[in-house]
Image (cartoon, helix red, strand yellow):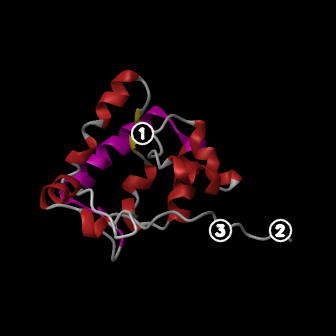
Amino acid sequence: MANASSIGGAPLLDGQRITPLGDFLRSTSLDELPELWNVIRGDMSLVGPRPLLMDYLPLYSDEQARRHEVRPGITGWAQINGRNTLSWEEKFKLDVWYVDNRTLWLDIKILWLTVRKVLVRDGISAAGEATMPRFTGARVEPKQ
């Protein structure tokens, strides 16, 4: 992405900053390859909830924060079930489901299905977005 900002200094939207090379890297998922270094270092796993911006930490509900009970991954249950076409609430629900149900066989299934998703370039961007809209906080249901 280009390092472009508005007159006030705020970064422009992703769609305004993405370059043709960046668009190609993103559409082919080649932009994820540098994360393999984090897997080798032990900071990440191949499979697990995708790491998100640190800015989001105070915005999680208690349930959504459970995604941090496992090491983050390059791919995960939410990625093979919709990737960026999912709402934030759906992604977090799938991430927590993975935390509660993870097994070696599930990880193998996720890796296999990830290859398929990458080859067909499915779910790369949310509707009307270059990537995904910014997470603005959990929708917490009122207790009855």
Q: Residue at x 44, y 66 (%)?
A: 86
Say which residue label 1 marks. 73
Three-letter residue code for mark 3: Arg
Q: Residues within 10 Å of mark 1 (few under 14, many from 20)?
A: some
Query: Marks 2/1: CA distance?
Result: 33 Å
Residue 48 is situated, as x and y percent measured from the top left of the image, at 46, 41
For the residues labelled 2 and 1, say whether their Cβ atoms are less than 8 Å apart. no
Which portion, as a residue range, is magenta?
99-126
Mark 2 vs mark 3, foreground winner is: 3
> Vertically, is 23 above or below 68?
below
Three-letter residue code for mark 1: Gly
Say which residue label 3 marks. 139
Q: Residue at x 45, y 32 (%)?
A: 104
Residue 41 is situated, as x and y percent measured from the top left of the image, at 38, 22
Say which residue label 2 marks. 143
Q: Does residue 122 belong to the magenta stretch?
A: yes
Q: Secondary structure at mark 3?
A: loop
- Residue nearest the observer in this picture, 49 or 135: 135
- Residue nearest the observer in this picture, 29 or 81: 29
Q: Residues within 10 Å of mark 2 (few under 14, many from 20)?
A: few
Looking at the rendering, which quadrant does residue 144 occupy?
A: bottom right
Mark 3 vs mark 1, foreground winner is: 3
